């Protein structure tokens, strides 16, 4: 029974690990069954080994638990395909909640041992308290299952939350520090009546505050996501509107050209009767120059056609050669908004890089098509001048300090769909390839 106490104290990392995996099930690098097959025995073995060490040396579990938590956090981050900001913040949040539960159970342990001085000398929770500790942790994991697998999961999977993850990690870190600060230097301090009562109140208050702030963050994130999603849809609608206006203008020009064709043929007939070949050539040259370009349609998918047409117009305005080979049907096997976000991010980056390139070298080439029934392949190629800054696999922005948001967003969208994105740059040519999976 004595040996069981430190093992059970360390065993709380198992429900904590389970809770951390709830919102990221779709972002695992390996199948869930394979992950459970090796991770569950490993965690049980580590907890048992740590408990034996604590029992043999009669030492508290806190330092071993800290090392075990750090190790499991590294394992957790390495088994996921999401960014470090997201996985690290989720791990910190779970640690913060379980730190609050630990403080509460420390107070429960002190209440159970009050008046039993022979048991107070042990460096671990009493058996009843450690069982209560385990029950509370598992109960919390069960209660948190639904919000973690629904609301939090949507937040993790949505790329619009990229900016929020950069600051939220501070909150769980503060709560972890507060709970560490609350641990009394001497265990006997807790057995004072008023101190124990205050410890109970503060522990419960910290737990509820932590849950309250997490709920507030979740609601704020959902609101931000909704607004950003609306902005993206409005941007796509704006592109479609501009594309519609361009098409309408081109159609009107073509109609006017057809209307004038009869008069032009009459004029050509008159010149032909005169036998003036030079005038005929000059007249034909002027007539051809006034014929509008009918390069109006790129693909059957309206949303993708609008995005490609929008950036085509911008490129032509800046005299940037713009080549398009795109074959996308009206109904796509992949998410249409994600496809448009990938196209707009890649084409915007290509356009900005081209504007900083010598005019004689400017070039943008887009290729997009479906492969099989579930894959969309996209490649954007552009020339560039200057130096590409890359740090740790992330490309640095040329407009501001820090990572480039566009390529990072493209990579996350591709990975979220089970696809992949690769970037190469050589001899002044930058190529971005993306595979989206339906």
Image: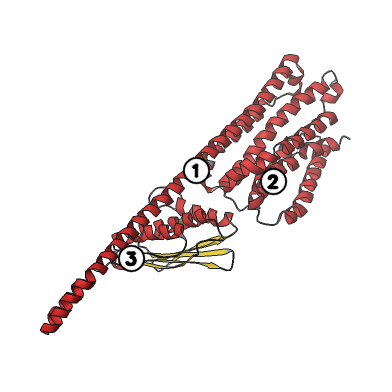
Q: Horizontal placement of 331 versus 323: left or right?
A: right
Dot 1: within a 10 Å radius of its alpha carbon, few (fewer than 14), some, or many (20 or more) residues? Answer: few
Residue at image coords 10%, 83%: 274
Q: Horizontal placement of 423 versus 184: left or right?
A: left
The secondary structure type at the circle numbered 1 is: loop
First in residue order: circle 1 vs circle 2: 2
Image quarter (top left, top right, bottom left or bottom right) of the N terminus:
top right
Farthest residue to the right: give it: 1
Residue at image coords 75%, 24%: 107
Which residue carries the number 3 mark? 362
Q: Residue 340: image x %, image y %?
A: 47, 56
Cα distance between the residues tagged 2 and 3: 49 Å
Of 346 and 270, the residue lying toward us: 270
In the rendered image of this protein, does residue 251 appear above or below residue 69? below
Q: Residue 279: image x %, image y %?
A: 13, 79
Which residue carries the number 1 mark? 163
Contact between labelled residues 3 and 2, with CB atoms less than 8 Å apart: no
Q: Which mark is residue 72?
A: 2
Of 95 and 56, the residue lying toward us: 95
């Amino acid at each position: 029974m004595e040996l069981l106490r430190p093992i059970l104290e360390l065993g709380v990392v198992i429900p904590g690990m389970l809770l951390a995996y709830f919102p990221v099930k779709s972002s695992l690098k390996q199948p869930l069954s394979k992950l459970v097959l090796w991770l569950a025995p490993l965690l049980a073995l580590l907890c048992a080994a740590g408990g034996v060490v604590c029992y043999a040396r009669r030492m508290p579990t806190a330092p071993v638990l800290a090392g075990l938590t750090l190790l499991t956090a590294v394992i957790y981050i390495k088994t996921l395909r999401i960014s470090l900001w997201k996985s690290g913040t989720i791990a910190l949040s779970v640690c913060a909640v379980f730190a609050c539960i630990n403080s509460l159970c420390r107070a429960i342990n002190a209440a159970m041992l009050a008046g039993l001085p022979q048991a107070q000398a042990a460096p671990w929770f009493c058996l009843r308290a450690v069982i209560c500790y385990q029950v509370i942790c598992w109960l919390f994991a069960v209660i948190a299952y639904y919000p973690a697998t629904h609301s939090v999961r949507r937040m993790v999977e949505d790329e619009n939350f990229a900016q929020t993850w950069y600051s939220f990690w501070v909150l769980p870190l503060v709560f972890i520090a507060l709970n560490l600060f609350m641990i009394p230097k001497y265990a006997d301090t807790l057995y004072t009546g008023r101190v124990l009562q205050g410890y109970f109140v503060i522990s419960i208050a910290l737990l509820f505050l932590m849950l309250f702030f997490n709920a507030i963050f979740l609601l704020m994130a959902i609101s931000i996501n909704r607004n950003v999603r609306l902005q993206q849809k409005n941007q796509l609608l704006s592109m479609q509107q501009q594309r519609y206006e361009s098409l309408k203008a081109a159609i009107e020009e073509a109609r006017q050209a057809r209307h004038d064709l009869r008069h032009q043929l009459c004029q050509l007939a008159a010149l032909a009767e005169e036998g003036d070949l030079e005038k005929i050539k000059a007249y034909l040259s002027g007539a051809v120059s006034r014929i509008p370009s009918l390069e109006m349609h790129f693909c059957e998918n309206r949303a993708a056609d609008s995005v490609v047409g929008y950036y085509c117009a911008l490129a032509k305005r800046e005299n940037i050669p713009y080549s398009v080979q795109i074959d996308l049907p009206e109904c796509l096997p992949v998410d249409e908004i994600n496809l448009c976000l990938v196209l707009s991010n890649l084409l915007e980056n290509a356009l900005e890089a081209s504007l900083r390139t010598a005019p004689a070298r400017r070039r943008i080439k887009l290729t997009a098509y479906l492969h099989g029934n579930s894959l969309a392949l996209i490649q954007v190629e552009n020339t560039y001048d200057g130096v590409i800054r890359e740090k740790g696999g992330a490309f640095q922005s040329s407009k501001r300090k820090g990572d480039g948001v566009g390529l990072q967003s493209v990579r996350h969208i591709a990975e979220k769909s089970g696809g992949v994105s690769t970037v190469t740059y050589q001899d002044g040519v930058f190529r971005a390839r993306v595979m989206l999976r339906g």
